[in-house]
Image: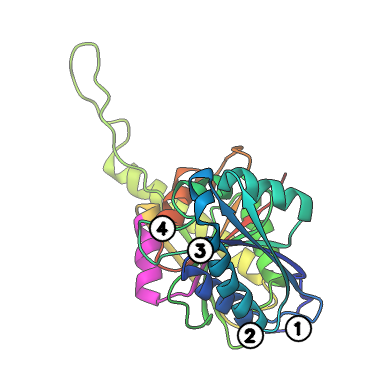
Amino acid sequence: MTDKTNPLRNILLADDGTENMVSAIKFLADLPHGDDCSVTAIRIFTPTEGSEYSRIEEEMNITRNFLKSRHFHFSTEAILGDPVKEIIHRAEALHPDLVVLGGKATGKFGGLLGNVATEVTHAGKWPLLIVKKPFQHLRKVLLAVDGSEYSQHTADFLNTFPLNEPCCLTVTHIVQPVQVTYPIEPAGMALAAITPAEEERINNENLAIGREMVNKLSGKLTSFSEIDQVVALGDIVEEILALLKKGEYDLLVIGSRGHGNLSGWLLGSISRSLVQSAPSSILVFRSGI
């Protein structure tokens, strides 16, 4: 892996008051970061939590202590309001290089995750890192691409993202299979729209196009000395989740346009499913805004 220009100087950490923050801070500390890297930790609480401010302050102290122990320059702030709106509002003011949330390593999230993470994922303008616990190390990265221009932007971002050596990268593209359909004619007869042979031919052509795209994109990821490639046919979410589990990846990287302007399979319901179900931490990159 070649040297990179470190892009992480301004990080917004959304503190959810849970032990998930420990994993998030460990993840950040595991990334190479310069002396000029600054973390702004915000603890958002709702009006129903207002009477428990002493507990909120204690939780913020835990975050402060961890940030201090990892030698970050940091500031903390408690904010009363709606989590999604306040995270986006604070990010608009700070223009962070990265927004960080913490989350469980299961399909259902606590803390800031769930609807909050999903909304921030698709409404924000900034790279978003969702860290699952327990975090141990960052050694294996899976980049999922769909052939859209946003996949190329995401690959460019990953090419400059600071990662410790050795870090193994796999680039994957999952082809949604074309299936034989049977429209009903007015006379009540079901006729195949395509034959099984045509179905196989189209799927094989799409796989070949996917391999060419992944190979071309991998050639531009010059920061990585070795890159594995996986192109497969099947259900996109199921295949990526199976690959994450089998390969024991530490980080899934996907792209998104944001602001609800979604195109490509990684930018809509599939990306939301991956955010909610992936066993690994997830890095979502924004582009084209």
Q: Label 1, label 2: how many angstroms apart (C-alpha)? A: 26 Å
Looking at the rendered structure, the secondary structure element under dot 3 is: helix
Looking at the rendered structure, the secondary structure element under dot 4 is: loop
Looking at the rendered structure, the secondary structure element under dot 2 is: helix
Q: Indicate left or right for 273 with 27 as reference.
A: left
Disc number lying in front (4 or 3): 3
Which tag, 3 or 2, sits closer to the chain's start? 3
Disc 4 target residue: 110
Q: Amino acid at mark 3?
A: Arg
x, y percentage for residue 15?
Answer: 57, 62
| Residue 247 in sight from this viewpoint | yes
Disc 3 target residue: 55
Residue furthest to the left: 188
- Tag 2 and tag 4, C-beta contact below 8 Å: no
Disc number lying in front (2 or 4): 2
Disc number lying in front (3 or 2): 3
- Tag 1 and tag 4, C-beta contact below 8 Å: no
Residue at x 40%, y 76% (from the top left corner): 247
Which tag, 2 or 4, sits closer to the chain's start? 2
Q: Label 3, label 2: how many angstroms apart (C-alpha)? A: 21 Å
* Mark 2 crowdedness (10 Å alpha carbons): few <14, some 14-19, many ≥20: few
Disc 1 target residue: 3
Q: Amino acid at mark 2?
A: Ser
Q: Amino acid at mark 1?
A: Asp
x, y percentage for residue 193?
Answer: 32, 30
Residue at x 42%, y 54% (from the top left corner): 276
Disc number lying in front (1 or 2): 2
Looking at the rendered structure, the secondary structure element under dot 1 is: loop
Front one among 242 and 146: 242
